[in-house]
Amino acid sequence: MPEPLPAGTPGALIATTDHGLDARLAGARRWTVVYHSTNGRGADVPVSGIVLLPPGPPSRGGWPVVSWAHGTTGVADACAPSRLADLGSGAYAQELSALLRAE
């Protein structure tokens, strides 16, 4: 996470990392994103997430957008599934792979 944290409003993008194609996630292209959020006291904090793009051309009408929330994994940066190659659990990778393969 960047230090010092640049100024920004909740949801504003701080950084992205392109990881290319990820065989663990149905061959989807994977990006890690870091963006602004707020903690329980209302202070500006950086948080991370991932963006996945399924392989191949989009379905008629374009790609559907799915927002997936993992179960509780902890509060430390090291606990964030977006920072781990397998999202911290083979089950998480299987869930997302199923979503990515769905039409």
Image (cartoon, rainbow, N blue to C red):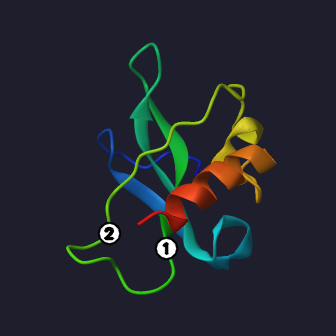
Number of residue marks: 2
Outermost residue on the front side: it is 103
Residue 96 is situated, as x and y percent measured from the top left of the image, at 59, 54
Pick the residue in front: 57 or 86. 57
User: Which mark is first along the chain, 1 or 2?
Assistant: 1
Q: Residue 97 carries which label?
A: none
Residue 88 visible within the image: no
Task: Name the amino acid, label 2.
Answer: Trp
Task: Name the amino acid, label 1.
Answer: Pro
User: With 45 as the anchor, is 58 left or right in this view?
Assistant: left
What's the residue at 66%, 66% (across, down)?
A: 25
Tell me the quarter of the picture where residue 61 sits: bottom left
Q: Name the image quarter holding the C terminus.
A: bottom left
What's the residue at 72%, 26% (across, down)?
A: 74
Q: Are marks 2 and 1 in contact (CB under 8 Å)?
A: yes
What's the residue at 52%, 37% (across, down)?
A: 69
What's the residue at 34%, 79% (across, down)?
A: 58
SS for dot 1: loop
To which residue does mark 2 refer?
A: 63
To which residue does mark 1 refer?
A: 54
Mark 2 to mark 1 CA distance (whole Å): 9 Å
